[in-house]
Amino acid sequence: MPDLLIELFSEEIPARMQARAADDLRKRVTDGLVEAGLTYAGAAGFATPRRLALAIEGLTGESPSLREERKGPRVDAPEKAIDGFLRGAGVSRDALEVRDEKKGQVYYATITKPGRPAPEIVAEVLEQVIRTFPWPKSMRWGAGSLRWVRPLHSILCILTDEAGEAHVVPMEVDGIRAGDTTEGHRFMAPGRFSVTGFEDYAAKLKRAHVILDAGERAAHIWHEASNQAFAAGLELVEDNGLLAEVAGLVEWPVVLLGQIDAEFLDLPPEVLQTSMKEHQKFFSVRNPKTGRIERFVTVANRETADHGATILAGNQKVLSARLSDAKFFWENDLRTVRDKGLEGMGAGLAQVTFHNKLGSQADRVARIEALAREIAPMVGAKPDLAAEAARVCKADLQSEMVGEFPELQGLMGRYYAQAAGHDDGVPEACEEHYSPLGPSDEVPSRLVSVTVALADKIDTLTGFWAIDEKPTGSKDPYALRRAALGVIRLVVENEVRINLHKVIQDRIAAPHVVHDLLQFLSRRLEQVLRADGVRYDVIEACFNTRGKVLKDAQKEALELDAPDILDRPFGEYDLFLVAERAKALSSFLKTEEGENLLQGFKRANNILTQAEEKDGVEYSFGADPKFAEDPTETALFDALQAAEAKIATANETEDFTAAMAAMASLRAPLDDFFEAVQINSESQVLRRNRLNLLFTIRKICLQAADLTRLEG
């Protein structure tokens, strides 16, 4: 079976597009080949700044011949129908076969499609892929109609047989004829050379100063940069995104360690790192003893006679100009903070619109301050400190540094808060109140930070729900899903006991909107718990506890338009409590006792439900032990009495593991009871008593969780 090698050689491909383009080339070509009847053993795509390449191993030499029988019209059908069948089948009339069927004689055509050689299929598929390639942006050049990300110079397309002989696939796209040659490094190895297969191609490229594999280029950059930093007694600051980007900018990475002028070393390390990354694509090199950024790493695309000295000198000159700007911003901001305080820096927020229906950024800060003061006792923070942090948490948005580098918002707030003399967790809250920004982002744990972070996110959610700007489908322009997940993670991971329904109700007048937002938050909690391995039905069971159902209460409020319906004990709306109960129940159901008890409960509930439906009554009048005839019946009465007390105590102390253990104690007496006793006894007294006993079982178990919601 032959191997296929394709290279599309062009001017520089933007680094951000390379990985996706290599994958698109692999997928589209292989899909096209398979659809045309060819198979292959393996395929890999590659990208450098000037080429996309695809290597396919074990490609079949031709597509298989296909034989198809097609049923046509009856022999006595109108001529037009028969002629249409002949045209569709592509056969002549004398090639038709007549067969006897129940309704008469029918024409059949046997259609044979001969296989096609691989070169013909490859040429057809590759041309289609090139002409329809999904670049985010593309261009035309010259007089041709072809669009490519940058001008396409050459196409390499060869099939290598088992003897190692390479054959060019004959094809042409807009005047570019396929061949077996490519080019190496633009400066270090100009000129074209021929290749005979992928191994020969990769080896000759490396000799021509081109590392084909982006992963290999990235590993080389990281290894060399780390070694040079270590030799200088420093350490390289990890940045995988920058590493991938730089690997897409060079074909032959040459790592150079540069010096930062002393006058800039006192800038915050994050400012140095951000400025060098965003403007120069430099890696930061840190002194592990001081935490300061003292040097940088740049990656050139060629070796030079002076070992990069000229390149470094030029880079350092440009870097100094950039860092001079950063230093100017830093010093100006510090001067503003020292003269006017952090609140003075943020005074301009009154002229910055947050949303035309929600007022200015200053209006928003005022709302966050009020909310932070309100929820601080629930979190355990001091209200005055929380309010102080909330007043200044957005002030750095008016700083010159954040104006230049928006990604430093919050972080610069911490520096400026420290410079203004704030302490006791206020500076940290300025930085951390944006967190968490995503599922892998760290959750703040300082009390003031948690309080302001919750206030910030709850204000966002209640504000946009109040003006009916909710997420729809895949659109979420105000990142409200992220805000809700942030609330959930702050509550659950910090074990915060916040009365969310009251906080939301105080800020949204319409009960149906309150209901909708609570539902939105509960779905985010479900998302977090499911990511932790908790089953959906377990989560549902824990949202429905003791018959006082969060979702049902919300539904009732919606239907009756009665806000007081939501004024329930806040434990029913305590999402941390739901999470803890769900984790405990999830762990319990993974044990043998849990699974067996669930089956026993299901059996008891099914029998009871069927009897209640049949009899039209509810058997909730209390079972009487004096009617117990069997020892297992008496034992179950005793077990239920003990379990009910333990579950009630465990629920009061929120020891859900103990509640599950108490339920587990019912397993053996319940099994024995079902084994020995017939529920639907001929004696109506015994039957009613035993059904009332089943009701007691259901009531006691539902105190721990709504087991009726569980599957299986």
Image (tube, grey):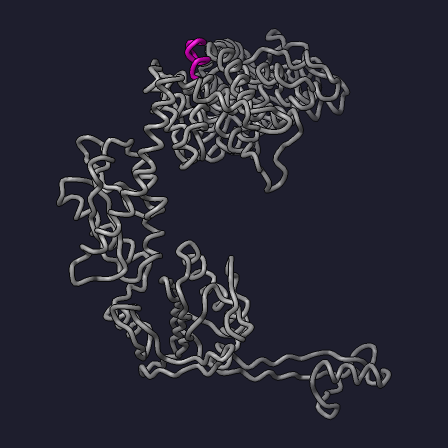
Residue 708 at x, y = what percent? 60, 26
Across and down, in percent, residue 684 comes to 72, 16
Q: Nearer the viewer, residue 527 or 702?
A: 527
At a point 76% along the width and 84% down the height, the residue shown is 107
Vertical position of residue 302 compared to residue 532: above or below: below
Is 152 placed above or below 413 here? below
Q: Residue at x 33, y 44 (%)?
A: 277
Q: Nearer the viewer, residue 630 or 615?
A: 615
Q: Residue furthest bottom?
A: 94
Quadrant occupied by the C terminus:
top right
Q: Is residue 54 left or right of residue 643?
A: left
First to last magenta residue range:
380-389
**314 sits left or right of 277 in the view:** left
Tell me what residue is drawn at x 37 percent, y 28 percent.
Answer: 412
Q: Is residue 382 magenta?
A: yes
Q: Quarter of the image containing the N terminus? A: bottom left
* 594 to the left or right of 95: left
Residue located 34% across and 24% down the image? 334
Q: Nearer the viewer, residue 338 or 90?
A: 338
Assign the magenta stretch its main secondary structure: helix
Q: Nearer the viewer, residue 536 or 680?
A: 536
From this viewpoint, is residue 518 visible?
Answer: no
Q: Position of residue 550 (x, y in %)?
A: 61, 20
